[in-house]
Amino acid sequence: MRGDFSRWHLDTRSNFNGILPQQGKLLIDADGLAQTRIANHWQQTSARDWVGAVAAVPADEPSSFAVSAAQINADGTVTLTLGSGHIWADGLLVALGDGTGTVQRAATWLEPPIVPNEGSAAKAADAIDVVVLEVWQEGINGYQLPNALIEPALGGPDTAERLHTATAFRLARINAGQSCKNLTFTDSGLGKLTATLQPVGKITGDCPIPVGGGYSGFEHRLYRIEIADVLAGSAAMFKYSRENGGLVGRCIFQTAPNHLTITANLVAITTANQPSFYVEIEQWDAARGNWQVV
């Protein structure tokens, strides 16, 4: 979850049910985050216990998310025609469209046989593909949806984000003897990242003094570290942020040469005192129905 948060922690076994603000006492961002995460954990757990770890649609909207057509495109993607409505996906409530008619979404393969511009494998005789609904939660900031989240009467400051349930439609080819019920995915090919503190150094002598390393308690608690999505053939690269990816703005991007014109949150970005930095641009993809790094 990207954003400038001071703390991101939830112990699901602690039996906390909510926060209790006190008069004259500080209310910080971690309190609001705790309330949201407690409520979400309760809702999602109860939904999984009640509905089950399945994708379930309401009885009065049986065509919700139903796939009625699929069209293979030249770039190897597939355009799906789906029923509008809502669904419970492993405890998460997800809506699609306005509840009437159908909606079209682009779908991509979770893994080969399909690679963009190499779509011949999609037309293999007697091939069967299943549609996988991928669901995740993300933070949406005001610079992504300024008309809905930024208050013009206050001069447009960066304020609270909104927790959003994002979706993507993916495809997976099934082999002989497989079906939706026994199709499995593994993360064996994925890497794992671990982080440790630097060792605490000491100035030796009659009065040893600890210097450097460790955690002093004054640092920002939450860092964000990810593997960057670099161009094919480029070396792998880490990206990291002391603000948990919370230094955001809005821009107009032009190529030849690459040029960014910042149109929102300019002061915060230009006064961040960073001699070098990594810029990542996200754009809403209406065909896929989610934000994409472009």
Image: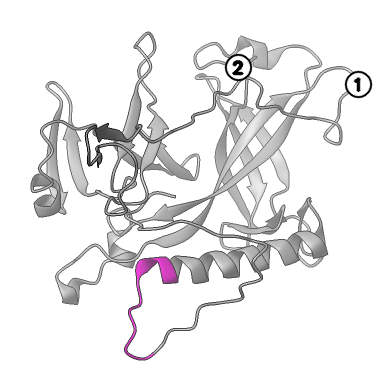
Magenta region includes residue 28:
yes
Q: Nearer the viewer, residue 95 or 32?
A: 32
Tag 2: amino acid? Ile
Rendered location of residue 224, percent (x, y): 37, 41
Q: Is residue 13 above or below residue 261?
A: below
Q: Position of residue 233 (x, y in %)?
A: 37, 8
Q: Position of residue 238 (x, y in %)?
A: 35, 26
Q: Residue at x 42, y 62 (%)?
A: 162
Q: Nearer the viewer, residue 201 or 269?
A: 201
Name the colouring of the figure: one colour
Q: Which residue is mark 2?
A: 114
In this picture, residue 180 sits left or right of residue 203: right
Secondary structure at numbered mark 2: loop
Is residue 240 a member of the stretch shown in magenta? no
Q: Residue at x 37, y 27 (%)?
A: 228
Question: Could you tell me how far apart the alpha carbons at marks 2 and 1 are, in whole angstroms?
Answer: 21 Å
- Left or right: where 266 falls relative to 208: left
Q: Main secondary structure of the magenta part?
A: loop
Q: Residue furthest right?
A: 177
* Quarter of the image with the C terminus in it: top left
Magenta residue span: 23-31
Q: Amino acid at mark 1?
A: Gly
Query: For residue 129, what is the image quadrant?
Result: top right
**Of pointers 2 and 1, the one earlier in the residue sequence:** 2
Q: Quadrant of residue 78?
A: top right
Q: Residues within 10 Å of mark 1 (few under 14, many from 20)?
A: few
Q: Whole-percent x and y of residue 73?
A: 55, 24
Residue 224 sits above or below residue 145 on the image = above
- Horizontal placement of 286 versus 183: left or right? left
Q: Which residue is mark 1?
A: 177
Q: Residue at x 41, y 66 (%)?
A: 30
Residue at the outermost bottom position: 23
